[in-house]
Amino acid sequence: MVFVADALPVSLVRIIEFLNEQMSSAEVLGVEVRQYVGGEHIVYVPRVVGNTSTAVAQKSTTGAQQWDEALFLAAVNARCTPAEVSLVGRLMDDVRERGVGLVWGRGSTPGVAGWYSLHGRPAGVWGLNASVAQPSGRAYMALNLADLVNHIGTDRIEAAAGVLERIPSLARKIAEARTNNWHKYPSSYLADVAPNTVRIETLFEGIRILTDPAAYTEAGSL
């Protein structure tokens, strides 16, 4: 999978790197093609992102780490606050109750994706990453709007976005996704959501609209 643009924002670069590190059987890269004009000449200079040293290492047999529930939760408990741990558990429980299943990452940092059935087809709706085991590490989640728009259409994405952008840490990224026809993966640190009950409920309301036709219909009637 290759993302090509004249400029790749930092948020998308982070998602590309995350996906490439987690997907051992596929390559996820970004190509930024800058244009330089001098007189009558135009030069295009490409830059490849996503092929990090971590991604290269995890795709080799010696550098790969296959995460499972026990390993992932152990990392989350060691690296996250109690409020963040609670949010992670609730997200996983939501998939177990309403979704298709959890897909565990394979990379240097602990990751998991929540998959749901959308119009009878399984799709990854969100991804969680516990980050690195260092003081600078911050666990985060990403919403796969760029993938979901092809499953459920722009109207439903817009309905969910109207809810999710109430979360301050997602507001700007949701706005960027909207201006790019939803071809973005808005992300937020868990710490910017977990301590606040209103933000947590807002997050789950947005996820329900993305994954439940009844919730979407109800949102449209309000």
Image (cartoon, helix red, strand yellow):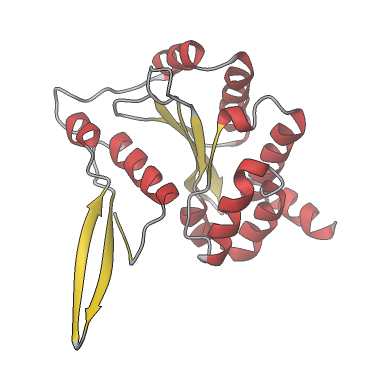
Q: Residue at x 30, y 29 (%)?
A: 106
Tell me: 23 left or right of 95: left
- Residue sitting at 68 percent across and 37 percent down? 204
For residue 190, side relative to residue 61 (left or right): right
Vertical relation: 26 (above or below) 92: below
Q: Is residue 186 left or right of 90 when viewed as pictured?
A: left
Q: Residue furthest front?
A: 39
Q: Position of residue 57 (x, y in %)?
A: 18, 30
Quadrant position of the C terminus in the picture: bottom right
Residue in the foreground of this view, choosing between 79 and 213: 79
Looking at the rendered image, the quarter that the N terminus falls into is bottom left
Total numbered labels placed on residues in the image: 0
Q: Residue at x 37, y 22 (%)?
A: 132
Q: Nearer the viewer, residue 43 or 5?
A: 43
Determine whether 186 is above or below 46 in the image: above
Q: Is residue 152 left or right of residue 62?
A: right
Residue most extreme to the bottom: 40
Residue 90 drawn at (x, y percent): 63, 25
At 67% across and 39% down in the image, what residue appears? 203
Image-quadrant location for residue 177 = bottom right
Q: Position of residue 102 (x, y in %)?
A: 47, 30
Question: Percent from the top left, x then y, of residue 77?
Answer: 51, 12
